[in-house]
Image (cartoon, helix red, strand yellow):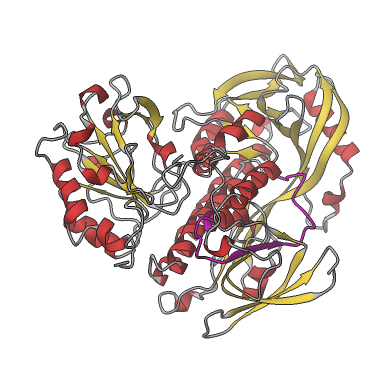
Amino acid sequence: MKYHHHEYVSRDPRIQDPAGTGINRPDDPPDEVDVLIVGAGPAGMIAAAQLSQFSGVNTRIVDRRASRLEVGLADGMQKRSLETFDAFGFAEPLMAEACHVTETAFWKPDPASPEHIHRVSRLDEDPNKVSEYPHLTVNHARVLDYFAEFMAHSPTRMKPDYGLEFQGLTIAPSGDHPVEVKLAYSAGPKAGQERTIRAKYVIGSDGAHSGVRKALGWRLQGESANHAWGVMDILADTNFPDIRVKCAIQSESHGNILLIPREGGFLFRLYVDLGDVGAGDQGAIRRTPVEQTIARAQQIFHPYRLDVRHVAWYSVYEVGHRLCERFDDVPQDQVGRRMPRVFIAGDAAHTHSAKAGQGTNASMQDGFNLGWKLGHVLEGRSPETLLATYSAERQKIGRDLIDQDKHWAAQMAKAPEDFASQAEFEEAYLRINEFAQGFMTRYESSMITATAQDQALATGFPIGKRFWSAEVMRVADANRRHLGHEAKADGRWRLYVFADGASPGEDSPAAALGRWLAQSPESPILRFTPAGADENARFDIKIIYQQNHTQIDIGQVPAVFTPRMGPYRLADYENIYAALPETDIFDLRGIDRRGALIIVRPDQYVANVLPLGATERLAAFIRAIALPQR
């Protein structure tokens, strides 16, 4: 965290000074806004949190609820989400209050007594160690609280506007604020009153029954799996030995259970198999009383006791896999001919089963993807064509999620005798686990994601996948740091210069790149950073040397890696790193010893890998996605 470079700070440094639209921000939404977000769920709140860092963008987020969510429907926070939360500054406090899931135990009918279940195996939640973060379970209302706190501390002083319900929208063919949204107050002293807000852009993150999606004429397409599950968060007295472990439990004749331990040490969630849903059910299964679901769970747990003392939350759902054909308002036959004005995200765009933990987690990646793009376009940093990449990227990811989730949901619903072998269920879990944790997302080539022409220079940073962090040594203060944790949700692009073997001060490709970045008229730093702004206001540039940190003379490092900041033009020395001898990032991530340049998007995905000397290609790549500022 950078502070003191404007003046001495004695208050909480996380609270940024108000700026732009955050100065004298009105309590009620104005008649015209830049971005109107409908729905304060995970997708909407992360998009709002990202946009809150763009002080020149007037964003409002409305929700029909009267106040904050108290009981969240989701509970699993996957490792990719934790990487994202770190960028917003709350991964550590969330981990402190959450339940850490490190193993999954598998229980099956005991061959010696099939009416009894017994444990057959345990699996590590991250056997391939693809992230340093844990898998958590926590009430997702707490995650929304942390996003709200981040927004409130931002320059724009954003907060959700509760008690406003979406009624409809129209999109004019032209105009500065072409999207007219009709709202009605659903709570408070103005309940029943209507109001209209005109916006440049609208995000519909208002759930599976999205009014925004319906107003666009889009629909979710797909099918149900004709299988129902009762879900309950409970406090219970039990002698089941793995009650604080994530468990997949298969009984001989009463169905299956997925057990999820929850935060706080006592609460846990049960997904209880209620069986197939008949063709003429007409929703009757969703009225299954909680007592019946508890009785089914007790049968599955046999011979262990399950004495339910309190039910904190209960619901019944039928597995459904549905996807919207577009994630924005542009019909397929007009793609490329006009730019989008309205977007949908989260459950408004895709729905799947809850057991793979993808509802909240995938929704947040939708909002993160879209938020920075809107900020860049509205502040004049990027061309409007950038917005077309949202639907192109996230709709494909939604389709991939549903394909994987269908497979896992089918495995969860199987009876033990339907498996070809004893290990088939565990093998299916391992296959889906890395996908479920959020690490199989890979964006295809586009204006913001290059082809893999030079991928061999950094095989551990696949283009289109998230930047995989590793530990390095910060040279200035000899602090070990996770390189990926240094990147914050501030809307900046990142350039990671992995130096060749030369030392600072020697003539080398890394030194030449540093001179070019500081001096060339084609340098992205000079072309796309506003005059008078901090030198790193648009691009966060870091260099990682191969030598031990004690061998690096900061005074010989090119000046572009110690950018000047604030009114006093103070040098930032915290962008210079060295590989660690015992866990060398060059070896861990397959980085060529001749060096490599890794370009990373504001949402933490690798955009390009280039040789250190490929300055013309670097300039061309940035030119396509950025507008000159000087």
Q: Examine the rendered structure and indicate whether residue 513 appears above or below residue 57.
A: above
User: Is residue 159 toward the left or the right of residue 372 in the image?
Assistant: right
Quarter of the rendering occupied by the C terminus: bottom left
Q: Examine the rendered structure and indicate whether residue 415 appears above or below residue 605.
A: above
Relative image position of residue 372 (x, y in whole percent): 47, 58
Relative image position of residue 271 (x, y in whole percent): 74, 37
Relative image position of residue 449 (x, y in whole percent): 34, 56
Camera-nearest residue between 4 and 621 = 4
Residue at the (13%, 32%) spot, across then down: 502
Residue at the (27%, 43%) spot, across then down: 561
Outermost residue on the left side: it is 507
The part of the image, by quadrant, that contains residue 342 is: bottom right
User: Is residue 281 toward the left or the right of residue 138 in the image?
Assistant: right
Q: Examine the rendered structure and indicate whether residue 236 appears above or below residue 621.
A: above
Relative image position of residue 426 (x, y in whole percent): 56, 29
Residue 165 lies within the magenta run: no
Residue at the (79%, 38%) spot, across then down: 232
Camera-nearest residue between 474 and 117 = 474
Secondary structure mostly seen in the magenta stretch: loop
In this rendering, does residue 184 appear at all? yes
The part of the image, by quadrant, that contains residue 329 is: bottom right
Per the rendered image, the range of residues in magenta is 50-73
Camera-nearest residue between 251 and 614 = 614
In this rendering, does residue 398 appear at all? no
Camera-nearest residue between 127 and 572 = 572
Residue 65 lies within the magenta run: yes
Residue at the (82%, 29%) spot, across then down: 235
User: Is residue 436 toward the left or the right of residue 382 in the image?
Assistant: right
